[in-house]
């Protein structure tokens, strides 16, 4: 679970802790401009946040009195920054509905690896950023390599370039 101490706003990086895999020892990942801005905006919503507080804290929402009953207005209450969000299931479902998209959480990892491969990032860079331990595991998530191979082979069908 991420805590505010895992985010370095000056160096624009996030340190992810150990993952559930045997080799997942944690790593520092650079933040894109969009990710950095999103975290900065999110952080502003928690003016009392301390380094040990969770980025996604436990909180409850309910209808805001008469206004909530009549208009569906909600209010946040019982926010506990020292306790992490209990389940992502409801939050993820609401985010998908709001964005009007369908995907699984793990699809984002596949997209990340594929986009990195499309950008011509090296295998070592992709593996370091995604936390993969082997080229075989990286290839499991990225179909770009197959397309790149097809394009490379297609060059053999073209007439050779003559140098004058």
Image (cartoon, rainbow, N blue to C red):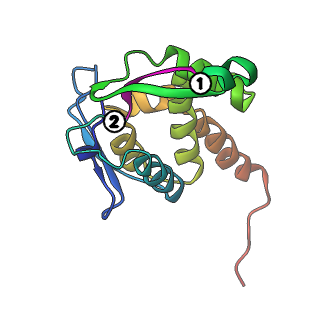
Q: Which residue is mark 1?
A: 64
- Rendering coords of residue 137 (x, y %): 41, 27
**Crowd tier of the residue under label 1, counting other residues whose Cα lies within 10 Å: few below 14, some 14–19, many 20 or above:** some
Label ID, residue 117: none
Residue that appears at 33% across and 44% down: 128
- Rendering coords of residue 101 (x, y %): 72, 27
User: Which secondary structure type mostly characterizes the magenta part of the structure?
Assistant: strand
Label whose residue precedes the other's in the sequence (1 or 2): 1
Q: Which residue is mark 2?
A: 131
Q: Nearer the viewer, residue 70 or 120?
A: 70
Q: Which residues are magenta?
A: 56-63
- Rendering coords of residue 12 (x, y %): 36, 59
Q: Nearer the viewer, residue 45 or 22?
A: 45
Q: Is residue 133 above or below residue 123?
A: above
Magenta span contains residue 39: no
State if disc 2 and disc 1 touch (CB < 8 Å): no
Image quadrant of residue 6? top left
Helix, strand or loop status at disc 2: loop
Residue that appears at 55% across and 31% down: 108
Q: Which residue ends up furthest to the bottom in the rendered image?
A: 164
Specify whether residue 142 is in view. yes
Q: Is residue 8 above or below residue 56?
A: below
Which label lies toward us, 1 or 2? 1
The quadrant of the rendering that contains the C terminus is: bottom right
Q: Is residue 104 left or right of residue 129?
A: right
- Rendering coords of residue 59 (x, y %): 41, 24
Image quadrant of residue 71? top right
Q: Nearer the viewer, residue 24 or 103?
A: 103
**Crowd tier of the residue under label 2, counting other residues whose Cα lies within 10 Å: few below 14, some 14–19, many 20 or above:** many
The quadrant of the rendering that contains the N terminus is: top left
Helix, strand or loop status at disc 1: loop
């Amino acid at each position: 679970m991420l805590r505010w101490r895992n985010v370095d706003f000056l160096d624009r990086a996030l340190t992810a802790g150990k993952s559930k895999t045997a080799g997942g020892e944690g790593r520092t990942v650079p933040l894109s401009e969009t990710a950095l801005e999103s975290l900065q905006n999110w952080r502003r919503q928690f003016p009392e946040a301390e380094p040990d507080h969770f980025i996604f804290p436990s909180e409850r929402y309910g209808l805001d009195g008469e206004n909530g009953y009549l208009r569906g207005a909600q209010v946040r209450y019982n926010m506990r920054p020292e306790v992490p969000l209990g389940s992502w299931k409801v939050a993820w479902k609401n985010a998908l509905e709001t964005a009007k998209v369908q995907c699984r959480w793990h699809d984002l990892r596949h997209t990340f690896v594929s986009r990195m491969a499309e950008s011509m990032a090296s295998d070592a860079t992709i593996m370091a950023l995604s936390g993969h331990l082997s080229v075989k595991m990286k290839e499991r998530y990225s179909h770009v390599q197959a397309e790149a191979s097809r394009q490379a082979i297609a060059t053999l069908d073209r007439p050779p370039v003559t140098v004058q």
